[in-house]
């Protein structure tokens, strides 16, 4: 049994990596709030977690909209009177040729992937301070903040911004003893894992492509109260892919 049940908000928790994170915290015994714009997938995830005995609710939230972010944390404040952990995970990509990417599409990516993280972190920090919680914030970045392929300008810029935002927040929130860290996933397969080829797995030192559970385990580590000496870092979870030298023949 846990010494204390925590309240955990996971943005973008309806599917993919966020779903794996939400399930991991619920399995730990925490109260989980899934904040997502996708009602259908979120309700399915809530049903799966509840079927396993987890404590979870869904609050529909579009992180493009500042007022919806404020409403999310007000509901958490009223319902739970505390917040221990925020996982900033909601994200979108727009991989388009440079000449075709519109200003509106650029702004949409930055508003979700970066501004949304900032606004959620700001509201989460306020609630943590109000309730005297020495909490944790984890921002899901990407190895694309550090390396790129073509047509990924908006996504790469947003994830690079997440890394800068992370260490700035860690500095600003240090007096409140709120840790802030980033995780940069590499290739995490959220679809049919069995459809992957051996050549896909072979690209990694780990000899396998990642799974959402790999990122969830990193989140559990970074939000463990015993790990309060770890703050301001970017934890790369990629099976070693970004450290593998690959030469074209």
Image (tube, rainbow, N blue to C red):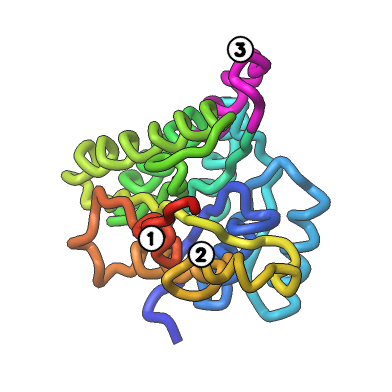
Badge 1 density bin: few <14, some 14–19, many ≥20, Cα 10 Å: few
Going 61% across and 68% down the picture, which residue do you hit? 199
Q: What stretch is highlighted in magenta?
A: 94-113
User: Magenta stretch containing residue 225, yes or no?
Assistant: no
Position of residue 217 relative to residue 182, above or below, is below
Q: Where is residue 57 in the image (x, y as percent from the top left)?
A: 67, 58
Q: Which residue lies furthest to the front in this view?
A: 249
Q: Residue at x 29, y 68 (%)?
A: 225
User: On screen, 96 above or below 246?
Assistant: above
Residue 30 percent coordinates (x, y):
51, 70
Task: Identify which residue is drawn at 22% across, 46% down.
Answer: 176
Q: Secondary structure of the magenta portion, mostly?
A: helix
Q: Which of marks 3 and 2 is in front?
A: 2
Q: Which residue is drawn at 52% across and 76% down?
A: 29
> CB atoms at circles 2 and 1 under 8 Å apart?
yes
Q: What element carries label 3?
A: helix
- Write down the residue under mark 2: 203
Choose the circle earlier in sequence order: 3 or 2: 3
Residue corresponding to mark 1? 244
Residue contact between numbered discs 3 and 1, judged by CB atoms under 8 Å: no
Tell me if residue 110 is in the magenta stretch: yes
Residue 70 in view, yes or no:
no
Judge left or right: residue 32 versus residue 121: right
N-term mark: 2 or 1: 2
């Amino acid at each position: 049994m846990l010494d204390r049940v925590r309240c955990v908000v996971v943005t973008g928790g309806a599917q993919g990596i966020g779903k794996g994170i939400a399930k991991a915290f619920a399995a730990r015994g925490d109260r989980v709030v899934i904040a997502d714009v996708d009602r259908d997938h979120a309700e399915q995830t809530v049903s799966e977690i509840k079927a396993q005995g987890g404590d979870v609710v869904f609050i529909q939230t579009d992180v493009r909209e500042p007022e919806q972010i404020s409403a999310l944390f007000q509901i958490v404040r009223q319902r739970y009177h505390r917040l221990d952990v925020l996982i900033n995970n909601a994200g979108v990509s727009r991989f388009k040729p440079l000449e075709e990417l519109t200003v509106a599409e650029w702004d949409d990516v930055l508003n979700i992937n970066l501004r949304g993280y900032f606004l959620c972190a700001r509201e989460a920090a306020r609630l943590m301070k109000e309730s005297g919680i020495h909490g944790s914030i984890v921002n899901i970045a990407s190895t694309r903040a550090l390396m790129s392929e073509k047509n990924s300008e908006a996504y790469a810029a947003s994830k690079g911004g997440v890394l800068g935002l992370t260490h700035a927040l860690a500095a600003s929130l240090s007096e409140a003893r709120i840790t802030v860290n980033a995780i940069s996933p590499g290739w995490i397969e959220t679809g049919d894992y069995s459809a992957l080829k051996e050549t896909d797995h072979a690209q990694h030192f780990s000899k396998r492509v990642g799974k959402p559970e790999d990122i969830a385990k990193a989140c559990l580590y970074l939000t463990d109260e015993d790990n309060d000496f770890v703050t301001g870092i970017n934890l790369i979870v990629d099976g070693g892919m970004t450290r593998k030298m690959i030469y074209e023949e």
